[in-house]
Image (cartoon, grey):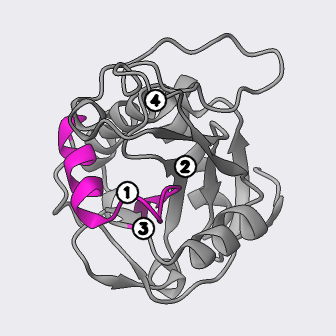
Amino acid sequence: MPPVLFRAPAYRDLIDQNGATVSSSAFRGKVQVVTFLFPYCNTFCPVIAAHLVGFENLLAATPLAGRVEVVAFNVDPGGTGPRQMRDFLREYGWNPANPHWEYLTGRPEQIRRVVTAGFHVDYQKVMDSGSDDAAEQATPALAVAGSDPQPIVANPLAARARVDYDITHEDVMMVVDGQGRVRAIYDQADAVGKFALFDKVKAVLAATR
């Protein structure tokens, strides 16, 4: 049985990729797969998004589909918003209208409180050197000790935006049960396969009936 690690933070009035207001109470009774994404990322985030598309497609073919939500938090709330979040999702195979995916943003202080104070996931803004290929050579996300360097992944949204900064952040995914308790933490979210994640979600659902 997956252990209870800590209680996930409560929040109100965050904004999803479609501009709708979302509070944590909307997920009561459902298992959440939680992750943290930067729309202009070209390392971990595109890989995580693509893997979650595979997971959602696997889930959709089962009776569990209505009991699970994918919830991502935008770790660049000061520089990006719903439009960039929608574009990011589309690039990696997701339909932003999918009711089982919520990509959430808000005021910078709101996101900091939820992500860092609540989920204990760090992120920070790092300015690039200003070279013309900054978008293609973004600073890699914060690495977990002992992990391998992450290859650069194409992100057309980042290439178009050509921003002069990166958001370094931890490569983390969590599974939260229907009572708002974190039951699993993956420190290398980009390496989590759809079948392993599906098995973990099933175990969390079984433990919280």
Q: Of helix, strand and loop, which one carries label 4?
A: loop
- The amino acid pointed to by label 1 is Leu
Asked if the residue at tag 3 contacts the one at tag 4, i.e. Cβ–Cβ closer than 8 Å, the answer is: no
Q: Which residue is mark 1?
A: 64
Of mark 1 and mark 3, the one earlier in the sequence is: 1
Q: Is residue 69 left or right of residue 114?
A: left
Q: Nearer the viewer, residue 156 or 25?
A: 156
Asked if the residue at tag 4 contacts the one at tag 2, i.e. Cβ–Cβ closer than 8 Å, the answer is: no
How far is disc 2 from disc 3 in space, using C-alphas?
21 Å
How far is disc 1 from disc 2 in space, using C-alphas?
9 Å
Query: Which percent across, then down, holds residue 120?
Result: 77, 58
Q: Quadrant of residue 206?
A: bottom right
Q: Which residue is mark 3?
A: 104
Q: Which residue is mark 2?
A: 201
The nearer-to-camera label among 4 and 3 is: 4
Query: Which percent across, then down, holds residue 87?
Result: 20, 49
Of mark 1 and mark 2, the one earlier in the sequence is: 1
* The C terminus, quarter of image: bottom right
Of mark 2 and mark 4, the one earlier in the sequence is: 4
The nearer-to-camera label among 2 and 3 is: 3
How far is disc 1 from disc 3 in space, using C-alphas?
23 Å
How far is disc 4 from disc 3 in space, using C-alphas?
29 Å
How far is disc 4 from disc 1 in space, using C-alphas?
47 Å
The nearer-to-camera label among 1 and 3 is: 3
How far is disc 2 from disc 4 in space, using C-alphas?
42 Å
Q: Is residue 44 left or right of residue 122?
A: left
- The amino acid pointed to by label 2 is Val
Q: Which residue is mark 4?
A: 130
Of mark 4 and mark 1, the one earlier in the sequence is: 1
Residue count near mark 3 (Cα–Cα under 10 Å), binned few <14, some 14–19, many ≥20: many
